[in-house]
Image (cartoon, helix red, strand yellow):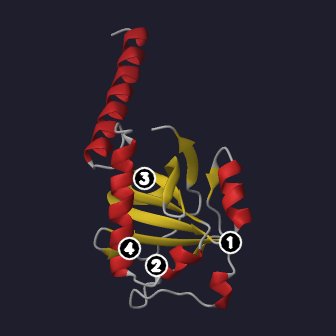
Amino acid sequence: MSSFSSSRMTRRGFALAALAGAGVTAACGNGVGNSNAATIDARVDATLNQMYSQFPNTRTLAEKSTGMLVMPLVTEAGFVFGGAYGRGALRINGVTVDYYSTVKGNAGLQIGAQQYAHVLFFMTEDALAGFRRSSGWAAGADVEYVIRDEGNSLTADTNTLTSPVLAAVFGQAGLRVGATLEGTKYTRIIP
């Protein structure tokens, strides 16, 4: 086989592997390939109901926040290199105002897949405005997590409530222990 033919097969194999990976991700039900706003809104409603049911004190945070970004289903998978993807909605006063996608890439020892939801509570007008103005907002180390693994309790002390952005990360079966959103990028989409 010539080197031209061999490189063509390599590219073709890579393209087929990428398409297969996208198919697996879509099969996970995370909204990939489904840009229907009504579907995203229904998933957001279900996620908020789940969060309020499992962690009732988050309802108080929702009432005090200036806006909430709800990511109902993020699928994270990897084999050495990994990534995560999901879609959700930004709600202000209980109404969807924009739709967002989230992407996260990482490297390191990892094998497997998981699905989780998360909600960002914007506690100040400045934090919300900064998020909405950005063309691609990335979660940093300054995001404060409000649900801890000690008895699935809500941590909302005086220091926490003064943080501009609070995060609740939980899985289908409850709390996602050791969760971090650092490096996760959010981009506005048109569904």
Asked if the residue at tag 3 contacts the one at tag 4, i.e. Cβ–Cβ closer than 8 Å, the answer is no
Is residue 148 shown above or below 50? below
Q: Is residue 40 visible?
A: yes
Task: Report which quarter residue 173 is drawn in.
Answer: bottom left
Mark in the foreground, 4 or 3:
4
Q: Earlier in the sequence, mark 2 or mark 4?
A: 4
Q: Badge 4 is on which residue?
A: 51
In terms of secondary structure, where does tag 1 sit?
loop
- Residue 161 located left or right of residue 92: right
Q: Earlier in the sequence, mark 2 or mark 3?
A: 2
> Which residue is drawn at the image coordinates 67% and 87% (left, top)?
159
Residue found at the very far right of the displayed protein: 126
Mark 2 or 3, which is nearer the eye?
A: 2
Disc 2 target residue = 59
From the top left corner, tell me how far across and down residue 31 is, in percent. 35, 45
State if disc 1 and disc 2 touch (CB < 8 Å): no
Q: CA distance from mark 3 to mark 1?
A: 34 Å
Name the residue located 34 percent from the left edge and 39 percent from the top edge. 34
Q: Is residue 72 above or below residue 167?
A: above
Residue 164 image label:
1
Q: Which residue is mark 3?
A: 80
Q: Is residue 85 visible?
A: no
In the image, residue 16 lies at what x, y percent?
A: 32, 27
**What's under tag 2, amino acid-wise?**
Arg
Which corner quadrant holds the N terminus?
top left
Report how far apart the C-alphas of labels 2 and 3 lie in the structure. Answer: 38 Å
Q: Which mark is residue 111?
A: none
Q: Kindly identify the residue that appears in the image at 39 percent across and 73 percent down.
A: 176
| Eye-nearest disc, 3 or 1 | 1
Mark 2 crowd level (few <14, some 14–19, many ≥20, 10 Å Cα): some
Type of amino acid at the residue the image marks with label 4: Met
Left of 92 or right of it: where is 49? left
